[in-house]
């Protein structure tokens, strides 16, 4: 398994190449790790509703999200979570929650 810090420590092509090489289970764990770390680093400034939304997303991130063919029910649920996040977070926060965002150190 490739380590979160090893992947995030690289530039964009490095991140994309390594993330793409991961099996679905490890992709899900990577994304959960990034969101958990981001939540822990930012919890002090988030509202209860924002923190709950991130926690809900973390719980939702399962390997099936990264396997083809995609389950239409999962896609629909993902779009609902995304729609909610668009209402709750700034563009910068949404960017930081993706693979584009900064590496978040473990606390």
Image (tube, rainbow, N blue to C red):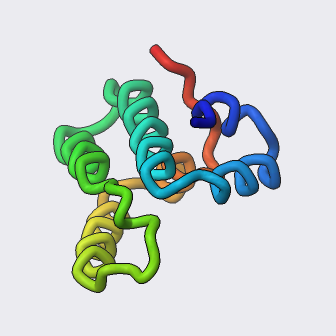
Q: Residue furthest top?
A: 107
- On the image, the x and y values in percent for residue 48 come to 18, 39
Q: Position of residue 51 (x, y in %)?
A: 25, 40
Please identify the quadrant where the C terminus is shown. top left
Image quadrant containing the N terminus: top right
Q: Is residue 10 left or right of residue 92?
A: right
Q: How many marks?
A: 0
Of residue 50 and residue 71, the one placed in the foreground of this image is 71
Q: Residue at x 31, y 36 (%)?
A: 46
Q: Which residue is pictured at 44% across the width and 70% down the height?
A: 67
Question: In the figure, 64 relative to 18: above or below?
Answer: below
Q: Quadrant of residue 38?
A: top left
Q: Is residue 74 above or below residue 19?
A: below
Query: Which residue is located at x 75 percent, y 55 percent?
Result: 17
Q: Position of residue 91 (x, y in %)?
A: 51, 58
Percent of width and height locating residue 22? 59, 51
Q: Quick check: 47 left or right of 62? A: left
- Report whether 68 appears left or right of 75: right
Work out whether 70 lies above or below 19: below
Q: Quadrant of residue 41?
A: top left
């Amino acid at each position: 398994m490739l380590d979160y810090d090893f992947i995030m420590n690289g530039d964009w092509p490095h991140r994309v190449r390594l993330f793409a090489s991961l099996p679905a289970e490890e992709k899900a764990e990577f994304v959960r790790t990034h969101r958990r770390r981001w939540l822990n680093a930012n919890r002090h400034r988030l509202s209860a509703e924002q923190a709950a939304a991130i926690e809900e997303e973390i719980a939702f991130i399962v390997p099936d999200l990264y396997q083809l063919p995609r389950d239409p029910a999962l896609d629909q649920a993902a779009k609902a979570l995304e729609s909610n996040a668009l209402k709750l977070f700034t563009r910068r926060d949404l960017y930081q929650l993706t693979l584009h965002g900064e590496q978040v150190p473990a606390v």
